[in-house]
Amino acid sequence: MPDRQPTPIGGSLHGEAAPTVPPCRNQPELRVVPDGDRDGGGPGPTPAVFPWGRRKVLLLNATFEPLTALSLRRAVVLVVCGKAEVVHGDASGLVLHSSKSEVLVPSVIRLSSYVRVPYRGRVPMTRAGLMHRDRYRCAYCGGRAETIDHVVPRSRGGPHTWTNCVACCAKCNHRKADKLLSELGWRLRVVPAAPRGPHWRLLAGVAEADPQWLPYLGEPAA
């Protein structure tokens, strides 16, 4: 089955196209094999199929520009087919094995050939992106944020936008309820604004970025 093209995190919004990566055929079936079973010497335990589902891998352009976050399966297929190379592997050193090859489980991969990046509009407003923007700190008290609050409550006409939403702790969220800041005598620690830059499109769809991604995502991701 041919590998699908990488899609920017947050989905295809406002008619955006995804960076085009050449398809890869004849995808191998990779399994995690214990070290003691690599060289034969008896049947040994049955290799375990790797859980592909939740792990994400950062895909860089040939110029090291961040493009998107891929599923682990798609990332491994790109590496095995020679479309990409591993820049940073799994911190634990986990290796995937097939009958003919082995691949270090990647955290960051880089395309072998440059792909044109289509024009991208505004960054989608997501809970993950907003938490990254506000550095997981409550916009009112500075404590650890656990939820999102609308500065002007939606019940009073407030929009669900970057400029009207802030990270908030549960205590402040409960105290504020549907009141305006002027009614409480509160002030925002930082005026909320829409973030800009390609790294924010990644952060908008990733709850927790791998620390190895941060050098490629810019200062706001730190």
Image: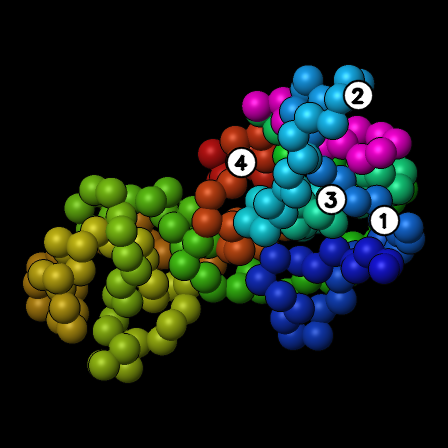
Seen from the viewer's position, the closer of residues 55 and 218 is 55
Q: What is the number of the mark on residue 75? A: 3
Which circle's residue, 4 or 3, is located before the other in the chain? Answer: 3
> Residue 153, image x and y in percent?
24, 73
> 184 above or below 190?
below
Q: What is the number of the mark on residue 40? A: 2
- Of the two numbered discs 2 and 3 in the rendering, the one whose residue sits closer to the viewer: 2
Q: Mark 2 to mark 3: distance in Å?
A: 28 Å
- Of the two numbered discs 1 and 3 in the rendering, the one whose residue sits closer to the viewer: 1
> Which amino acid, mark 1?
Gln
Q: Residues within 10 Å of mark 3 (few under 14, many from 20)?
A: many
Which circle's residue, 2 or 3, is located before the other in the chain? Answer: 2
Magenta stretch bounds: 92-103
Q: Look at mark 1 in the image and give the residue it sits on.
A: 27
> Residue 32, image x and y in percent?
67, 33
> Which amino acid, mark 4?
Asp
Taking the image as shown, residue 91 lies to the left or right of residue 26, namely left
Taking the image as shown, residue 102 lies to the left or right of residue 206, namely right
- Of the two numbered discs 1 and 2 in the rendering, the one whose residue sits closer to the viewer: 2
Instruction: Identify the residue shown where x is 58% and y is 24%.
Output: 91
In contact (CB < 8 Å): disc 4 and disc 2: no
SS assignment at label 1: loop
